[in-house]
Image (cartoon, rainbow, N blue to C red):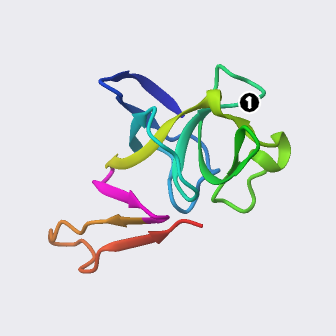
Amino acid sequence: MARTGPLFGIGTADVTGPSMLPTLRQGDRLVVRYGARVRPGDLVAALHPLQQDLPIVKRAVERRGTGWWLLSDNPYSETDSRVWGPVPDELILGRIVGRYWPRPSRLSAGLMEAESDGAEGDDADAERLRAR
């Protein structure tokens, strides 16, 4: 994940790598609300606990002590709290509140809905991705 700095608590993040498939894909661009309250099921931007110059995007599953248990949505990815344990609160940067590229969408309660733009050649139904 590449990121740009927060402006009034809002910033952006670029997705790199397959760890959040199928919810997020390589090249997706996200909106991050820095310092936002995190709840179980939210996608979050954090600093990697073993390489703190590396920003990551993961799903906050539950609080454990003074940190968050973060998991990848891709079940084949092994780069998450199953390896590092809980991620301390001070490494959680913020909550992912939307995706602005390739299509605008909202992230809400573990469900990401991409709105169909109704253009010729697009699927008539809105694309729905369930994040678990």
Q: Position of residue 9 (x, y in %)?
A: 35, 28
Pick the residue in front: 79 or 25. Answer: 79
Residue 36 position within the rendered picture, expressed as x and y whole percent measured from the top left = 44, 38
Q: The magenta stretch spans which residues?
A: 102-111
Looking at the picture, tell me which residue is in the foreground, 93 or 100: 93
Q: Percent x, y for residue 44?
A: 53, 44
- Assign a secondary structure to mark 1: loop
Left or right of residue 36, residue 43 in this image: right
Q: Nearer the viewer, residue 115 or 91?
A: 91
In this view, which residue lies farthest toward the bottom?
Answer: 124
The residue to which callout 1 is attached is 49
The residue lying at 46 percent from left, 27 percent from top is 3
Regarding residue 16, the answer to whether it shows in the image is yes
Res 28 visible: no
Question: How packed is label 1: few (under 14 Cα within 10 Å), some, or many (20 or more)?
Answer: some
Lateral position of residue 31 relative to residue 77, left or right: left
Q: Residue at x 46, y 69 (%)?
A: 129
Name which residue lies at 74% across and 30% down: 49
Tell me the quarter of the image containing the N terminus. top right
46 on left or right of 111:
right
